[in-house]
Amino acid sequence: MKLVFYGAGNMAHAIFTGIVNSNVIDSNDIYLTNRSNEVALKEYADELGVNYSYDDKALLKDADYVFLGTKPYDFDELADRIKPYIVENNKFISIMAGLPISYIREKLDFDSPVARIMPNTNAHVGHSVTGISFSNNFGAKSKEEVDSLINAFGSAIEVSEDNLHQVTAITGSGPAFLYHVFEQYVTAGTRLGLEKAQVEESIRNLIIGTSKMIERSELSMEQLRKNITSKGGTTQAGLNALSQHDLESVFEDCLKAAVNRSVELSNQDDE
Ligand SMILES: NC(=O)c1ccc[n+]([C@@H]2O[C@H](COP(=O)([O-])OP(=O)(O)OC[C@H]3O[C@@H](n4cnc5c(N)ncnc54)[C@H](OP(=O)(O)O)[C@@H]3O)[C@@H](O)[C@H]2O)c1
């Protein structure tokens, strides 16, 4: 199976590194290209054993999956560049936020199967939660192949294209929301009188440890919480204080705002 990456920036780098490291595809079958930064391509080729080229005809001739990894506003230029060379076997995987499948197919001017994926930044550590939706002409075997590519840098969740907005909010932007919560936790911890550096280091390890507990335990998060909350104890006292604030509606507002913005951005691209 031959993979081609159009765009080898921040997110594409996390994806092809994950794919190479998981050995789902031989690095020799992975090809990178970008607009002009050949130094970056050479670096990745040296580091990972992948290939790079600016010969679009040769890149696309026998490519099975073509990742579209430019910024959304650079896609029209990319589509003009590649459309003369698209062949029937090419299936496209867009990582570009907000661009609808219909728009991508129109610009490519070819009835190619197109998948849209919404990864998150945790792809850098092989833990992206990636939303995916497929065009109607994406075959079952090809879907399975895409699924295995996505599992190389985390996990996949298939949703309708409309629901990618929700995925964008919950897991696409999710790492930033959680970082923000952790920042507040550090600030509040510092106010208790310990040194900031000490608090930061402790909370960093607290978050890592708690994530590992979630990963390794069969129990729900609710049960994990209950297991460490004794009646009348310190944890119960803290949780009682927390429940005086409507955290659920705080997060509901946050996620709704992100969904609305995602819808707005994709409508702008339609105009
Ligand atoms: N970063 C995230 O957390 C994240 C999360 C989800 C989705 N995304 C999506 O991922 C996409 C890429 O984001 P990024 O942060 O990785 O961007 P980036 O680091 O700026 O990389 C953009 C890449 O596109 C290349 N490029 C631009 N125009 C091109 C053209 N005409 N032909 C071929 N290659 C071209 C650039 O090449 P040169 O370097 O040569 O200019 C560069 O390799 C965006 O559409 C974004 O919506 C990002």
Image: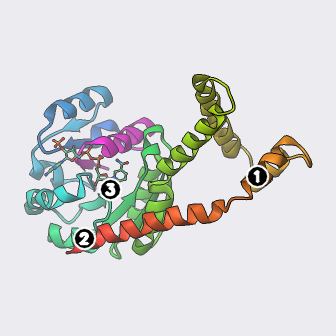
- x 32%, y 50%: residue: 1
x 83%, y 47%: residue: 237
| Image disc number at residue 241 | 1
Quadrant where the C terminus is found in the figure:
bottom left
In the image, which residues are magenta?
1-24
The amino acid at mark 3 is Ile
Residue 7 part of the magenta-drawn span: yes
Query: Judging from the image, what secondary structure is the residue with disc 1 in?
Result: helix
Q: Are marks 2 and 1 in contact (CB under 8 Å)?
A: no
Which of the two marks, 2 or 1, is nearer to us in this view? 1
Q: x, y (%) of residue 69?
A: 26, 51
Between discs 1 and 3, the one toward the N terminus: 3
Can you give x and y, in whole percent of width and height, for residue 101 in the image?
A: 29, 70
Q: Which residue is mark 3?
A: 95
Question: In what element is the residue under mark 3?
Answer: loop
Of 196 and 256, which appears nearest the observer?
A: 196
Nearer-N-terminus badge (2/1): 1
Looking at the picture, how far across and down is residue 126, in whole percent? 48, 41
Q: Which residue matches tag 2?
A: 268
- Which kind of residue does numbered mark 1 sit on? Ala
For the question of whether residue 220 can be seen, the reply is no
Q: Position of residue 258 (x, y in %)?
A: 44, 63
Q: Is residue 251 found left or right of 11 in the rendered image?
A: right
